[in-house]
Image (cartoon, rainbow, N blue to C red):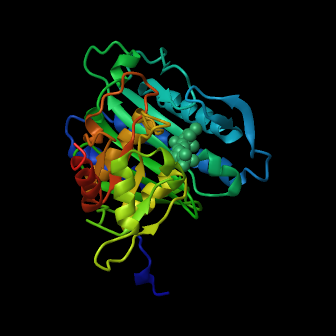
Amino acid sequence: VGSEAINTDIITLTRFVTEEQAKHKEATGDFTILCHSLQFAFKSIAYYIRRATLINLTGLAGSANTTGDDQKKLDVIGNDLFISAMKGSGRVRLLVSEEEEEVITFDQYPHARYAVACDPIDGSSNLDAGVSVGTIFAIYKLAEGAKGTKEDLLKPGTEMVASGFTMYGASAQLVITMKGGAVNGFTLDTSFGEFILTHPNMRIPKKRAIYSVNEGNSLYWEEPVKEWVNSLKYPTEGGKPYSARYIGSMVADAYRTLLYGGIFAYPADKKSPKGKLRILYECAPMAMVFENAGGLAVDSNMRRMLEVVPEHIHDRSGIFMGSEQEVQKVIDFHKRHQ
Ligand code: AHG
Ligand code: MN
Ligand code: MN
Ligand code: MN
C-alpha cells in the first residue's frame, strides 16, 4: 500500500463536533461535552454486547419495564451505562429511558440545559441470537426558565436539537443529525476507540422496492395497510413485486432503509390501536433522521411524525418511514379510505 492510500486526515466524531461548535459563535461547548458522554455510552454498550455470551450476559433479567417488555440482562446494563454517562456529562437535567418508569432528574446539576430521551438497547429480543441491536437517542434543549419536569419533554419532535441512533452490527455504526442539518454516519474503529466519519451527508434514495414490516400482524391491520402491502406483493401490469426485509430491530431495519431506500413500518392495528413503538425514544428521533436525509416519516393517521405530541413519556404511535415515494404510496392508500 502506498502511503498516499492512507488517510491521515481522519474526521473523528470528536473533531466533527468540535468543528460544528466552531461554526456557532454562541455555542458554549455544553453540547460538545454531552456528545463525549454519548460516545462513551455507545462504546461501553457495544463492548458488553460483544462480550455477552462470554460473561453470562445473555437471557432475561427477570423483570418487566413500564411498557410491558420483559427486560433482558443487557437492557438493564445498557440502561445503567447510559444513565451514568448522561449524569457524568453534567449537562443533562432530565432523562427519559424505555427502561425507567419515571423521568430521571439530575438535581445535582440544576443548571444543566439538556433533556435526553433514550432507548438504551433497541431490538433486545434479538440479543441472544447475536443479531444487530442499537441505541436510539433524542436531545432537547430546555427553554429558558424551564422547571425541569417531564412536561419539558412532552413536546413534538420538531423541538429536538439533535437525534440519532447506533447499530451494533458487524461494526458499530452511529448516525447523528442536528436540527435542520445533514445526517452523518460514523463507524467505530475499535483499535482507535473512535467513531470515524465514514458516511458524510447521508441521503436516502427517493424510492426502492423493499418493505420492512412484521407481517405476522397482518390479521390485525386496518384496510389501507392491508391494501398497501398487497399492492407491493401483487403489482398490476406485470410489475415486479417488492422484496421483504424484516430484522425486528428497528435500528437495523432503519439503517438498511437509510442506505438502500425502501420503507419501514410498524402500523397501529386492531390489537395495538396506538401502535407499538414509543414516540419519545423510538419514533421521533428516527423521524428526524429520515426527514433530514430527504425521506419522510408519518404516523398511522398520516400526520407528520415530528409533529406528534406525546401526552405521557412512554406513549406509542404507529410509524411509516423511509424513501419519499414509498411513504407517499402509504399516504395515498389512506387517502382513498377517507
Ligand atoms: P425494544 O427492543 O427497544 O423494546 O424495541 C423493540 C422494537 C423494535 O426494535 C422493533 O422494530 C420492534 O420492536 C419489533 O417488534 P415485533 O417483534 O413485534 O416485530
Ligand atoms: Mn424493550
Ligand atoms: Mn426499541
Ligand atoms: Mn429497548
User: In screen coordinates, is 175 left or right of 104?
Assistant: left
Q: Nearer the viewer, residue 266 or 57?
A: 266
User: In screen coordinates, is 292 left or right of 319?
Assistant: left
**164 relative to 75, above or below:** below
Quarter assignment of residue 59: top right
Q: Nearer the viewer, residue 326 or 224?
A: 224
**75 relative to 292, above or below:** above
User: In screen coordinates, is 139 left or right of 121?
Assistant: left
Q: Nearer the viewer, residue 262 or 90?
A: 262
Residue 42 seen? no
Q: Nearer the viewer, residue 50 or 35?
A: 50
Quarter assignment of residue 267: top left
Q: How many tags in the picture?
A: 0
Residue 288 seen? yes
The percent coordinates of residue 237 (x first, y second) are 28, 77
The percent coordinates of residue 311 (x first, y second) are 36, 22
Q: Residue at x 53, y 32 (%)?
A: 98
Q: Residue at x 62, y 32 (%)?
A: 80
The percent coordinates of residue 315 (x first, y second) are 43, 28
Return the residue found at the far bottom. 2
Task: For ligand 2, give the image quadrant.
Answer: top right
The percent coordinates of residue 111 (x first, y second) are 37, 18
Image quarter (top left, top right, bottom left or bottom right) of the C terminus: top left
**71 relative to 166, above or below:** above
Quarter assignment of residue 210: bottom left
Q: Residue at x 80, y 46 (%)?
A: 56
